[in-house]
Amino acid sequence: MEAVHRRTIQEAQKTANQPNPGRKRRFDWLRLLRHQEMLLALSSGGLMLAAWVWGMQGAMPWVSMALYIAAYAVGGYVKAREGLITLVKERDLDVNLLMIAAALGAASIGYWYEGAMLIFIFALSGALESFASDRSRKDISALIAMKPETALRVGGDGMEEVPVEALAVGDLLLVKPGEVIPADGTIRTGSSAVNQSAITGESIPVDKQPGDGVNAGTLNGEGAIYVEVSSPAEGTLFSKIITLVEQAQQEVPGTQRFIKRLEGIYAKTIVAATLALILLTPWLVGWSWSFAFYKAMVFLVVASPCAIVSSVMPAMLSAMSKSARKGVLFKGGAHMDHLGSIRVVAFDKTGTLTEGSPVVTGLYTAEGFAPREVLAACAAAESLSEHPLAKAIVRKAEAEGVPLRGAEELRALPGWGIEAEVFGATWRVGKVDDGDPMLPRPLAEQLRAWIAEGHTVSAIQRNGEYAGLIALRDEVRPQAKAAIDRLHEMGLSVAMLTGDRSVTANALAGEIGVDLVYGDLLPQEKVEHVKALRERYGSVAMVGDGVNDAPALAAATVGIAMGGGGSGAALEVADVVLMNDSIERIAETISLARRARRIVKQNLIFAGAVILMLILSNFAAGIPLPLGVVGHEGSTLLVILNGLRLLR
């Protein structure tokens, strides 16, 4: 078996596969014009305008009538269907049927244009809301697509490719270099650096050797490894991430449920009042049937919630448009509204507050060793490796102008690092323990200081003697501190949820001013902390970029993904996407969302007051239907214009 292992490892090293980063998906606003409901609404508006123009000519009035009927049918089809479905399946009335009834009522007393205008505005608003709702639907297809479908199982008869679902506990798998690990398990043979960012969010791959555990969905590095399965496919950590996302997506906001209930109550009340006006007033107050019907139709028109419906979406879409021009894309107007209520912003660390790749931050040499000599030898040895830390050291040497010498006899030291012959001496670069009695005291003190600051530290040895230490760290984004300071100025708290070590997380938090720090977190633990923050603060925004952040993004009130370097799963799950990874835009966008919420409140109060005034005027002053339509449509126009102010 060992001979088979060695041959397979050699073959795997020759056929190493590079991971496919996937294509980034773009939010296509052109889909809005191709949206079915939008096309119907615009067609309804065109027919209404054509009917009005033809009616102004005074010739063949039946043509104008036919155009109006077509405008009613085209614009009202979708909403009438939705209203009938609600009526039949849920035995409940909604605003859809109320608006259709108001438009038909206006037409029944000869006000075809006014009825068509009601249909058009309501259809347009409904199309915009439907489009935003479609885009806000959280899709986990990208996350599922990252899950391996097959595995290379090793048996007594050799190797065979089998579906991941067919794996059982105890099966032995071969994972070649560059492949995604298909199941949770334990390494039995081989060693490699495993990129665990999909699960833990760690910025630096973790060295794995026999006896260490690995998770499905993580990426194998340079070495071929044999993994013994410890959990069936449905029990892997990666599968649990998918389940967490699905559960978070099924949560319905309380506001949405309240609006749905209020809609039914409003529609039933208006319909009941209209029928009462038609049927009872002739008996109670002596109105004629024609006068009672006219009053009822005026009431139905002025009580229609067209202005109330238009109070929300124009303002939200204007704010979304302004954000889009600055590279912040919303997947729906509801998310803009939710963002205005945020009280705490939680950040992932790696790739969000940091750049996502390690850099050399310091080199400390022992007495008698020249820094350039040590860096040159270290870079020469690491130049033969593809490990992210090795690449960072080579980049440092190139930046310092240190020439790279040739290294010979590179050897991997499992669980420690590498060894190579450079300048006629044996140089080693790898892990270091501050309790090593051979470690000089100055180096031990520097090691402890760097670790306290959150650095990853490697030791450099020449012929078994410590030559120095080299520190590496995932660098903070230049705009991170300014972005957090701006959030603090707005009265918001800032949290950090990361899979990195708590020491590293706390060091970074102190540097940029984060209030709450939670380290060493797995994806499900991030979700638990997001839920705890929601209980404590009410509304939470989560900012992340990786697959491991997807459950937390879905569980947050608003999920914000890094669009430039974020994973496909994060982009699909998130409600808001920062296309240029500009975290400094977060505070600005929250401020805009707060302004949008204020305008929506203004609109709702104004629209409600106008409707109430028109209803009272209908009975107290007897306003004619045209004046009622002018007041109703005028209030609608004003709330739309008030919302469009956000475009500036």
Image (cartoon, rainbow, N blue to C red):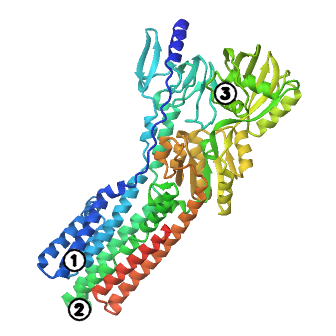
Instruction: Give how far across and how far down residue 44 sits, in percent.
Output: 25, 67
Discs 1/2, front: 1
Q: Which mark is residue 53?
A: 1
Check disc 3 and report the residue beneath it: 390
Q: Is residue 611 above or below residue 435?
A: below
Q: How many other residues sit within 10 Å of disc 2, few (<14), some (14-19) or many (≥20)?
A: some
**Tag 1 secondary structure:** helix
As measured in the structure, the alpha-carbon distance from the residue carrying label 1 to the one carrying label 3 is 74 Å
Instruction: Judge whether 66 appears above or below 569 on screen.
Output: below
Provide residue 227's location: percent of width, then percent of height. 54, 20
As drawn, is 607 to the left or to the right of 552? left
Asked if marks 2 and 3 touch (Cβ < 8 Å), the reply is no
Quick check: can you spot residue 293? yes
Badge 1 vs badge 2, beta-carbon distance below 8 Å: no
Question: What's the residue type where badge 2 is placed?
Answer: Trp
**Label 2 vs label 3, nearer the camera:** 3
Give the crowd class for mark 1: few <14, some 14-19, many >=20 residues within 10 Å. Answer: few
Q: Position of residue 204 (x, y in %)?
A: 64, 33
Q: Residue at x 67, y 15 (%)?
A: 411
Q: Residue at x 48, y 67 (%)?
A: 647
Secondary structure under badge 3?
helix
What separation in Å lies between label 2 and label 3 (alpha carbons)? 91 Å
Asked whether the viewer can see residue 432, the reply is no
Q: In the visual, does 531 lie left or right of 282?
A: right
> What kind of residue is marked 3?
Ala
